[in-house]
Image: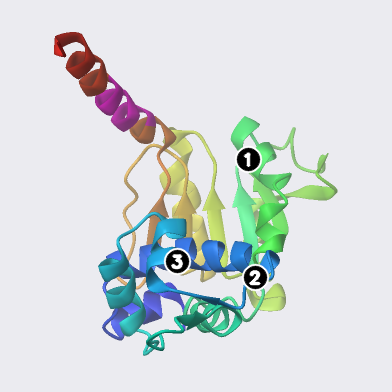
Amino acid sequence: MSAAAATRRGVPEASVARLPGYLRALTALAGEGIASVSSEELALAAGVSSAMLRKDLSYLGSYGVRGVGYDVERLASEIAAALGLTQDWPVAIVGMGNLGRALAAYRGFAERGFRVIALLDHDERVVGEEIAGCPVRPMSDLPGLVERDGLAIGVIATASEGAQEACDELVAAGIRSVLNFAPVVLAVPDDVVVRKVDLSTELQILAFHGQRLAVAEAVAP
């Protein structure tokens, strides 16, 4: 089941959000030839507490064996299935500015089961240009991409002023999963899931913590 489906079936969204971290840690362990891992070791690798990890995994019905721990490959498979990663997810990136171009060239999508099948833009000067081996297509191609190619996820990399329009077009074409990089809050129907990646907000949070550390060091004896 997908992350959204997992949430609907009683897995808290906060737990769903931590599953990719567990999968990443397990993948690294498998790459090192490690067959089993304790909850404490896996929690350390994922950057959470062991109690939190055990609770998160219990929602998936996965429990370690006392004295043995978790089977690395089996647990990775269970989490991948829970996240819906046992199938390819066709993705379209909307907005071919600097960020959109960088995302188009990012190889991590394909490595994790997300296949970028289209790059889209409203700007006629950009349409037809080839970026990372993929031609930029007009937004009018969206309905066909959904119907014929199974497009499932839209990634919005437009400027803030164009994000809502891009989102509306994705939703109208039948997209129900949107990843938004634009620094705006999008209005969507209840059956559409939007995940927001706000780089400026994350930097501001880091600045807050950096300032607190600086103040603490300044007053330390």
Mark 3 surroundings within 10 Å by alpha-carbon count, few (fewer than 14), some (14 through 19), many (20 or more): many
Of the numbered discs 2 and 1, the one sitting upstream in the chain is 2
Quick one: SS at disc 3?
Answer: helix
In the rendered image, the vertical position of residue 161 relative to residue 120, given as above or below: above
Of the numbered discs 1 and 3, the one sitting upstream in the chain is 3
Of the numbered discs 3 and 2, the one sitting upstream in the chain is 2
Residue 92 in the image: state x and y as whole percent. Answer: 64, 57
Viewed as shown, does residue 43 lie left or right of 150? left
Quick one: SS at disc 1?
Answer: helix
In the rendered image, the vertical position of residue 2 relative to residue 116, given as above or below: below
Residue 59 in the image: state x and y as whole percent. Answer: 31, 83
Q: Is residue 42 magenta?
A: no
**Residue placed most toward the observer, 90 or 86:** 86
In the rendered image, the vertical position of residue 216 relative to residue 200, given as above or below: above
Residue 188 in the image: state x and y as whole percent. Answer: 34, 60
* Residue designated by label 3: 42
* Residue designated by label 2: 30
Viewed as shown, does residue 193 lie left or right of 87? left
In the orientation shown, which residue stands out farthest toward the front?
Answer: 67
* Residue designated by label 1: 100
Type of amino acid at the residue the image marks with label 3: Leu
**Discs 1/3, front:** 3
In the rendered image, the vertical position of residue 11 relative to residue 95, given as above or below: below
Magenta segment: 203-210
Residue 44 in the image: state x and y as whole percent. Answer: 41, 58
Mark 1 surroundings within 10 Å by alpha-carbon count, few (fewer than 14), some (14 through 19), many (20 or more): many
Gap in angstroms between the C-alphas marked 1 and 3? 34 Å
